[in-house]
Amino acid sequence: MNSASRYNLGLRDTLRILLPYLRRNFMDQLRSIWFIVAYLVLFQLFVLQIPLVYALMIASGIGVVAVGLMFFMEGLRLGLMPLGEIIGTVLPTRSPLPIILLFAFLLGAGATFAEPAIAVLKAAGSGVVAEDAPLLFSILNGFASQLVVSVGIGVGFAVLVGVLRFFFGWPLKWLAIPAVALLGGLSLVFSQEPHLADVLGLAWDCGAVTTGPVTVPLVLALGIGVSRVVRSADGENSGFGIVTLASLFPILAVMGLAYWHFLSQDYYGTAGYQGELRQTTATKQEESRARVERTKEHVDIAAETYQSFIETGQLPENYRVTYSGGEPRMEDGKIVLTDPIVVIEQIHEPGLSLVSEQQWNSEKSFWGQFLQALLEALRAIVPLCLFLFVVLRVFLREKLSHGEDLSVGVGFAVLGMTLFGLGIALGLTPLGSQLGSNVPATFAKIVPWGLDYVEGPIFGTGHAGKLVAVVFAFFLGYGATLAEPALNALGDTVERITVGAFPKRLLMQSVAFGVGLGIATGIVKIAYNLPLIWMLLPPYLVVLFLTWRSPHDFVNFGWDSAGVTTGPITVPLVLAMGLGIGGNVPGVTDGFGILALASVGPILTVLSVGLFTRRREAAEERIEAREDNATYVAKEALS
Amino acid sequence: MDASTPLNTAPFEIEQALSTVTAILPRTQSHRVIDAIKDESRASALVWDARGTLLHEAWYKQLLPSISPAKAMIQLLVPDNEVDRMLSTIVDAGRLHLQSTGAVFCTPCEDVYLGADFHRWPIDHSKPMIDGSHDLHENLDVIYYIVEPERSDAISRAAIRQGSHGPIVYFGEGKGLRDRLGWLRITKQPLKEVISVIVESADAEAVFSAMAKAGQVHQPGRGFLYRIPVEKGMFNLPSRVSQPHHAANMQQIINAIDRLNGHTHWRDQEVFSVGNEGKGAGMDFLDQHSDKEVPRPQASLQAIVPRNDSERLTEIFLEAGVAGINVSHTRQERSGAETQSLESSASTEYSVLRCVMTEEKAIPAAKQVAEETSMAGLQDVCLFRQPVAQVATYVPGSGEFRSANLKAR
């Protein structure tokens, strides 16, 4: 664009363009996160009746999340997705197939190392005891790096096969159905062997967590670029499917890793074990606080409070005074008691205090969290973008016509991701983990998160309490999914590919509903300590049937949405709840399996919506058959 | 990319006798029509993905999830003497004479500039001429509304209420204003939706003004609305879809009455009611035909170019004094490109640039664009002009609604 035709805008006009833009984007993000935040806060205050800890920190964190999401989504729109799409269009025309496949493999593997899910998995397995589940314990600890590598290889192959699919026009359903059948069969075999059975939850969860908010949009855009250039035979392939494969192949890879170690017998407790033998859990559990039995009616007064009462005469808050004994007599028309015994009790009044006195977690400094988030954002975005940029400029020699937009976009993405990570650390994680660990109060006696008294069980029977927890889990999954940036990006992409025919809102609602269902099922699994395999196989059988019946485009959308649902917002919330509930159910050591179930749910719902609405489309085509009917009605009208 | 009939070595030749043939079909049917076009003659067709519009009559149906039907829009550049044959090929292959199938229409082009490499129509005199034996209408108009995506539903609804079929919507990119904002351009989404409706000329005014009102086109940033006369065509597009067991819809009844009466004049005079289905057409446009100023002729300038060159051509357009351009991306389906190897299965993406201005500006602008294009070395390009009947958009400096053909600027 030559500069002569540019408008010269003053400050006022600039602001008039800029402010509505900022407001619109900010409100968009607020709209996507308000539900989960309001839901969590209200549930804690009114259902559990436990005051909110670190309220100020959480509030500011959530504000930061909204700003961060705003920049990140704009960064995706301006930078990451165009970059992926350009590569996708240029690569097939200028490179031979082997080079393209090598690139695809490197991209997939690299994305896994950039957004490692291992921390999430370790958190889920924090309660694993070496003696109970030796193979799982070893994989999470001694073989953790092998786990990352095998997940990376799995994702790499997934992207490779996904790109190959575009060239040869393989329908996704004929890849997904055999893959799931294979995984289901292997899972059945694994479930027969105690040590291998422990690993199943980890393996299926690996599939769910591999695809993060940077990888998904990038890979989606890449797929769209490739399929713009390569028209496959059936013509309906629209660039989806890589995400699906990227959530199936790692399961296989992790199962393979587990089986290899099982065969070579070199994990904890077996002959070939190399590491040190110690009795410990996977990660050090938080030291349990001194639990003092306290009732809601009256709490012990701490020694310091007593000391300050002696010195200043200051009474603690929420006190109750009772007296007994004493000599009553009448004096100037008043009753005066001499030498009564006055008892001052401190009482705890739930519901009265909405927020606890701790407003900010002193262990979390703002700048420390900011730096950590910045580092994570840089690691997730910059190497991938550099890789793509180098491939584009050096190997493909493509000139970028929108260089400025792209770099602004990548900058926005880094900034957005930093703020987003910071906001999650300050706001959503403390909120979610206190809720997650407080929810068991519905059916068990617990010490609320960050507080120091015992609460619950709120509901008399264990089953009613667990039911409340399950219902809570459904809405938690629903709300958290609506806020996931990767799902937002998928919704935009689906809307764009279908020229607005499949609205983003519909996709997001059905996916969120499905995730809610999945997470609720996962909580049932943990609350009653059911074996994962029997929770996982039936929904997958239904999904296989629906997949077989569904049109190709819905298979694409449905399966891809399964891979994107478990992102940075959902995972901490869900894991905290899973671990919290598991900790109060005897025999449950890990929080694995919930995420895997959370990915089946959306496939189920999206495919159902697809089959449901296709009836309507079929109705439109059937109208032509009723032409005679119309003529008849018209004749009636004229006569 | 070889020119199949290199008649002329000049960078551009001006051909007069070309028309655009546009077809709108359900996407599931489109492959059959594209194949038929390829079989019929070694033609090339541009294909857009589009969506239809569904309106649900009952409020509870609006709450249920709905997915708009997938449509495809196909456009070809056809020599005038082949137009009838092409129309009937499309009608036959798409079974367009049936209800709720699709539409096809042709519009003549003026001043066609063809680049040397542009895939042109091989004129085949061996095939017999076909007089369009199908029941084609001659008094049709197409209305296009280029608008921000979030407004398109309201506009579609307004058009349907005024008796049109469910509009077809496809994506385009707005160029012009956005590129002049400097770094602030990141604040403007380039994505626009193009709503297109085919109407009988008699209904055109009413639908046009209903759409203008629904889209508030008189306000800044609310898009661009214009109407192009069609030479001939037919449309059988559905307007609304009910439950499968529901009786016939309005569109079907109107069409059936047309067929029984043998004409469409009754629509102008009568308002009829059929049970409680609703009221028929019969538009109030008597007062709109009075005391109009002589309209200034408007023209639409359209260019077809490979997608890689669309940026360059956009700049050429803007330099030629065009205020804003709508660019939509499409893929070219061409016969002879169907070998099994990987390289040739790559489809070719084209961009269609479109802008509307007064005819007196359009003619020199077209000339300048053509010259600049050949100087820039763009060979695979085609540029043509079509008359525009009516335009409505925001005119800077006027707060009130202005229709460009009502008031001379």
Image (spheres, coloured by chain):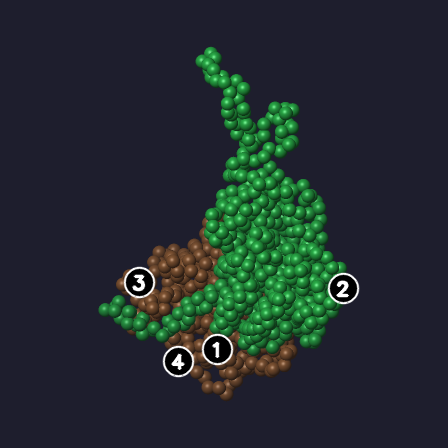
Question: Based on the displayed image, in which of its 4 quarters is residue B203 positioned?
Answer: bottom left
Residue A408 on image: x %, y %: 67, 55
Amino acid type shown at disc 1: Val
Residue tagged by mark 1? B33
Nearer to us of marks 1 and 4 is 1
Disc 4, SS: loop
Chain letter for the green colouring in the rendering: A
Label 1 close to label 4 by CB (< 8 Å): no
Nearer to us of marks 4 and 3 is 3
Disc 1, SS: helix
* Depth order, front residue of B25/B1: B25
Residue tagged by mark 3? B277
Question: Could you tell me which residue is drawn at 59 percent across and 80 percent down?
Answer: B337
Q: CA distance from mark 1 to mark 2?
A: 68 Å
Badge number at residue B133? 4
Chain letter for the brown colouring in the rendering: B
Badge number at residue B123? none
